Amino acid sequence: MNAFRMLVLGGDGVGPEVIEQALRVGRWIAGRHTRAIEFFEEPYGLSAFQSQGEILPARTLAAARETDAILFGAIGGDYAGVPVAQRREGSVLRLRRELVLFANLRPVQYWPALAASCPLRPEVATGTDIALVRENVGGLYFGQPRGIETLPDGRREAVNTLRYASDEIERVARFAFELARSRGARVCSVDKSNVLEAGVLWRQTVAALHVRDYADVALTHMLVDNCAMQLVRDPRQFDVIVTDNMFGDILSDGGGAVAGSLGMLPSASLGALQADGRRRALYEPVHGSAPDIEGKGIANPIGAILSLALALRHSVGDEAAAARVERAVTRALESGARTADIAAPGEAVIGSTAMGDAVLAALQADSGPRS
Ligand code: IPM
Ligand code: MG
């Protein structure tokens, strides 16, 4: 079998720092525990703009189209010197859209080892394991018309458009139902159908698909404002959540509170299943570029390492390797490894590389799941 090809785009801010640690884990596990994986890098982000005049050089975009999967750090920072059109052209939003990565999977789990730094009480959060599925290439983020105009009377007016066609809703809902079948078989569809027509169509489309193809999965509907409360009031009630682009962006940051820190959250942006069984895929930590701590070596690499685990599961197709990386993260946390974002008062704090060391040590010591 040919090596699996993984394009690495470190990007901006803490992106390259956290990806470096994910790569150490990836290089350790690839070939040893799973099929061979070839990691290759291409320029992307501010550094690409400085050296080549483009945030997303054509060669990088071509590689993104060709590769089996993308491991992505972060983008964002001091873009003041970059023309607005370039910024939009090079953004991760463009990559998601160009590659039609319509399903954004953002798992949220509670980590007992982080109880002291999680704002939720253990009796509320213990056992939480949510697969949040965010529609990733439509809705308010991309709807036309959009822009800021000056009105005849001199006032300025901003316009964004929330637009969803039924097939766009259906494909992400189908992904959520399929995923639910591999887990707790429950889907909660989240919308704002009491106010927005886009929410009415969202609910109708998900309900119709459910009756037609997924009657074996339990489906509930929830309004997004209620969901924001339920996520922190009783997160265990959820198995799979499916929602639109804007709501998914907001609710997934709420998930960061459940996990103890945004730095813990991984994500997978996935495209349609192709005839050969593969799908386009981009894996990235949810936390973003965090320019305030860039270059200090203190960013939490766990979101990136868990994103690599998602790549092993959903693109490489190696569940055992994915589970092994996730176990190693759990055990590193149990052994007391804490970056600043997940340290409770009084706990010793380590940097990104030392956290990578702790995860690698746990990987090496791993002798399988606990019974
Ligand atoms: C995320 C981020 C991005 C988004 C930003 C950086 C454009 O917040 O991935 O959640 O809004 O999708
Ligand atoms: Mg966000």
Image (tube, rainbow, N blue to C red):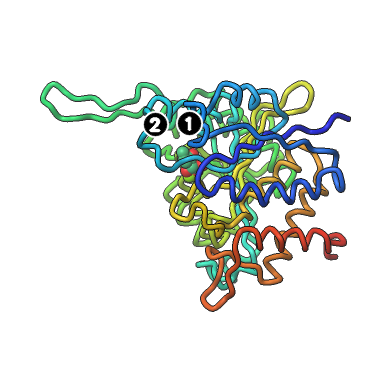
Q: Residue shown at 51%/31% (left/top)? A: 51
Q: Residue shown at 56%/55% (left/top)? A: 263
In-front residue for pair 130/348: 348
Judged left or right of residue 128, residue 256 is: left
Residue 135 in percent (x, y) is at 54, 35
Pointer 2: what residue?
82
State whether label 2 is within 8 Å of ligand 1. no
Pointer 1: what residue?
49
Q: Residue shown at 35%/21% (left/top)? A: 145
Residue 190 makes an appearance in the image: no
Q: Quadrant of the N terminus?
A: top right
Q: Residue shown at 60%/30% (left/top)? A: 101
In-front residue for pair 44/193: 44
Pointers 1 and 2 in contact (C-beta within 8 Å): yes
Inspect the image, locate mark 1, and give the three-letter code of the amino acid beneath it: Phe
Task: Say above or below: 70 vs 250.
Answer: above
